[in-house]
Image: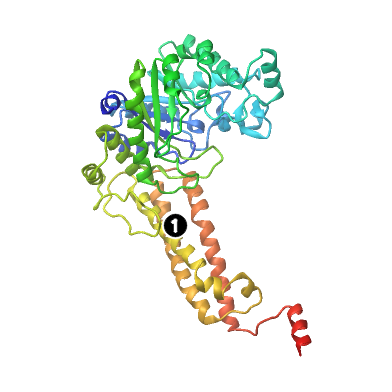
Amino acid sequence: MVDFVNRSERLFHLDLKGAAPRIEYYKKIFPLVASLGATGLLVEYEDMFPYSEPYTHLQAPYAYTPGQIAELQNLAKQNNLSFIPLIQTLGHFEFVLKHDRHRSLRELDPYPNSLCPTHPEAFPLVSGLIHQMVQMHPTIKHLHIGADEVWHLGKCPRCQDEMMSKPINAVQLWLAWIGTLARWIKENYPNITIIIWDDMIRTASLDLLKESGIGKLVEPMVWQYYARNFNLPEGMFDKFAEVFDTLWVASAFKGATGSTQFMPPLEQHISNQLTWLAVIALHAHKFKRFAGIALTGWQRYDHYAVLCELLPMGIPSLALCLRALTRGSFNVVDHEAVSQALGFQQKINITPFPRPQILEQGMTFPGHKIYLGVQMWSNFIAQYKAITSSEGMVGWFSTYLRSRNFTNPVQVETIMNPLSEVHQNLHELRDHMSVWMAEVFYQDTIEEWIGCFIDPILGKIENLLEECKKHILLGGRVRYYPIRNCVQAQGHE
């Protein structure tokens, strides 16, 4: 199983639909990931790509320039990393469909995730985007066209009519779209091999897949991010082997364990790689070629979601996962070797939860300040949660008691003092993270991360501290009884 992996690609996935790094960071990170065992890049640009007319409106405020795209490819070449762009072409199309001028192309009007494949403007739009991307990547040998999780496929009236008139089902509608798109790519760019995500055809029948001709057009990338028990359809690999000559697979090193996850659970991601090794050993030989594995690192769950683990938070996980894949196992020696390579004084903590925990020290990998800062933040948040759920808070400073100005200053002070400490620590960390993140990210990422993860907690703490001060000044008041209780008390007299 190790031979299969070591003879094939090991792709480092860059999901740029959130927290896209500055080009300067790639100069530091590419040599590192290459030394750790990565052989290529899978780059998912979304709105970070510098689309030209008539698609300039798709660019994010800090989108890369054409010159930076060229520099990115040169950096990859210098580090012997192959380069595969990824552009979504049906599902997860929010970066396009969020714009009013493209709203009519949605499968269902309220939902910006799925493109309608039967809309007359859909193909010209997607082929135009692909043309611009290929033109800016003149040496690529592969192009990934996504096409996963098309949740509302075949739901609009136009698609319903198309399906009834053929007649075909939703999977056949998907196959028809991919077939049309893939044939156009092959006609215009015959040297490019097309990759797709596999999930939309996992349960499709063998006859249907053969009849569609998809096996001659694309190569599937089977993705699964669980630690164990992949729960893929029984016989799926045997079916795929009868349709496709080549197999790709995809694991995850971050961004796959929760939409609000801030630190990767490393043990789970390592287990994901080891399980994939076992699956590859069982099934890769059934195909004429096992092309490789992509280690995905999702930055958001979709274009509208909050940021999950920042890329520097995932570097230790990526390093450990690459070690597991290239060695075929994971033991203490592997753990120590990767820890030393990244500058950790002790072995990397692969079970970072629950918090708080002792901060890791001595890291030297690019972005390690952010790694430390997020660990500090997570400890402070754990302390805040402990205070707000403490006996003092629940027993002496509840919302009910505060609403009646009936609190004991002695108990209030036991809440106020640790809250003040957490507030000061978070405020200082906010300033540090602004500086540390600026070394890696653009201003929009800094504002978003701080705005989502630090400022709301600071606001809650500040409100609580004001409440504490108010109730300490009150100095303990006579309990206010509701009228109902007073009437009952008088009746007993």
Name the one closer to the observer, 77 or 409.
409
Residue at left offset 39%, top offset 27%: 249
Which amino acid type is shown beneath numbered disc 1?
Arg
Residue at left offset 44%, top offset 30%: 223
* Residue 341 place in picture, x, y as percent: 23, 43
For this orientation, the residue located farthest to the bottom is 493
232 is higher (above) or lower (below) than 141: below
* Residue 187 place in picture, x, y as percent: 48, 9
Q: Secondary structure at mark 1?
A: helix
Is residue 74 shown to the viewer in this render? no
Assign the N terminus to one quadrant of the image. top left
342 is higher (above) or lower (below) than 237: below
Name the one closer to the observer, 294 or 88.
294
Q: Which residue is mark 1?
A: 430
355 is higher (above) or lower (below) than 157: below
Name the one closer to the observer, 340 or 213.
213
* Residue 339 place in picture, x, y as percent: 25, 46
Q: As drawn, is 76 to the left or to the right of 385? A: left
Residue at left offset 45%, top offset 19%: 239
For this orientation, the residue located farthest to the front is 234
Residue at left offset 43%, top offset 33%: 224
Check disc 1: other Cα within 10 Å, few if <14, some if 14-19, many if 20+.
Answer: some
